Image (cartoon, rainbow, N blue to C red):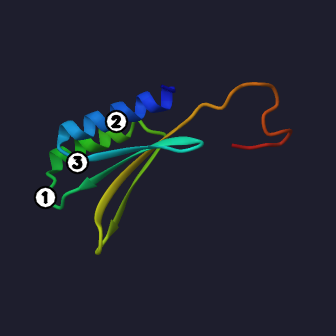
Amino acid sequence: MPASGVTAAAIAARLSAIGLPTRVEEHARFTTVEAEVPETLSAESWREVLDVVAEADRFGLLATSLNGRTLWAAVRKTVPTTGDVGGPGYQR
């Protein structure tokens, strides 16, 4: 399993331990973790959640009146270092 998958699995396990159901998905350039966040999550649990998602490269919260609140975290996959990937001037 790539390092991004290991990190994402660890994030998912820690969120599950807090009581949030999670989903992990592999994408071409990153691995994501999503969790549904109940309205009744305590302030202490929010602090734990923020500590957990801080391990990701990016994270956020999608809140809608139709679907509730979904927390997401993305962990970048490493790019192989095989010379000049992307060509000169390529920015990531």
24 versus 63 height, above or below: above
Q: Earlier in the sequence, mark 3 or mark 2?
A: 2
Q: Position of residue 63 (x, y in %)?
A: 33, 66
SS class, disc 1:
loop
Q: Amino acid at mark 3?
A: Trp
Q: Amino acid at mark 1?
A: Thr
Q: Quadrant of residue 79?
A: top right
> Quick one: label 2, few (<14), some, or many (20+) residues within 10 Å?
many
> Quick one: label 3, few (<14), some, or many (20+) residues within 10 Å?
few
Q: Which residue position is annotated with label 1? A: 40
**In the picture provided, is 92 more to the left or to the right than 64?**
right
57 versus 35 height, above or below: above
Q: Which residue position is annotated with label 2? A: 11
Q: Residue at x 27, y 55 (%)?
A: 36
Q: Which residue position is annotated with label 3? A: 46
Q: Nearer the viewer, residue 91 or 24?
A: 24
Q: Nearer the viewer, mark 3 or mark 1?
A: 1
Q: Position of residue 32 (x, y in %)?
A: 44, 44
